[in-house]
Amino acid sequence: MTKADVINEISEKTGIDRLDVQASVEAFFSVVKDSMAEGENIYVRGFGSFVNKKRAKKIARNISKNTAMVIDEHYIPSFKPSKVFVEKIKTSDKIS
């Protein structure tokens, strides 16, 4: 399912104009990206959490050149689904 499919489905279910739904979805993604870039985590009850995970500094190997390189400490975005979300997927008949 693409973002356009999600927008169309929300529009059909709510009766809200597709362009209004698109603006809302784009605004949501923008808020998530901007907030996480500022170091904030986002918690949506019943859905999940968007969190920044810290990766420690480490030494990696470049196999083709056989050299070591240092990867500095950094953060990566992560999503952790809520228990309600996980249970809904586990009990779904559609997933095989």
Image (cartoon, rainbow, N blue to C red):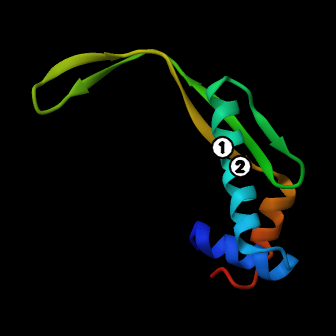
* Element on which disc 2 rests: helix
For label 1, the residue is 30
Residue 79 point in image, percent of width and height: 67, 45
Which amino acid, by three-letter code, is at mark 2? Ala
In this image, 32 relative to 46: left or right?
left
Residue at (66% x, 43% y) in the render: 30
* Element on which disc 1 rests: helix
Q: For this rendering, which residue is in front, 39 or 18?
A: 18
Q: Is residue 85 above or below residue 16?
A: above
Question: Which of the 4 image quadrants contains residue 85?
Answer: bottom right
For label 2, the residue is 27
The N terminus: image quadrant: bottom right
Residue 80 point in image, percent of width and height: 71, 46
Q: For this rendering, which residue is in front, 1 or 9?
A: 9
Residue at (66% x, 80% y) in the render: 95
Confirm or deny contact between disc 2 and disc 1 (CB under 8 A).
Answer: yes
In this image, 22 relative to 69: left or right?
right
Name the mark on residue 63.
none
Q: For this rendering, which residue is in front, 47 or 13?
A: 13
Residue at (76% x, 70% y) in the render: 90
Q: Residue furthest left?
A: 65
Report the Cα–Cα distance between label 2 and label 1: 5 Å
Question: Which of the 4 image quadrants contains residue 47?
Answer: bottom right
Q: Is residue 5 above or below residue 82?
A: below
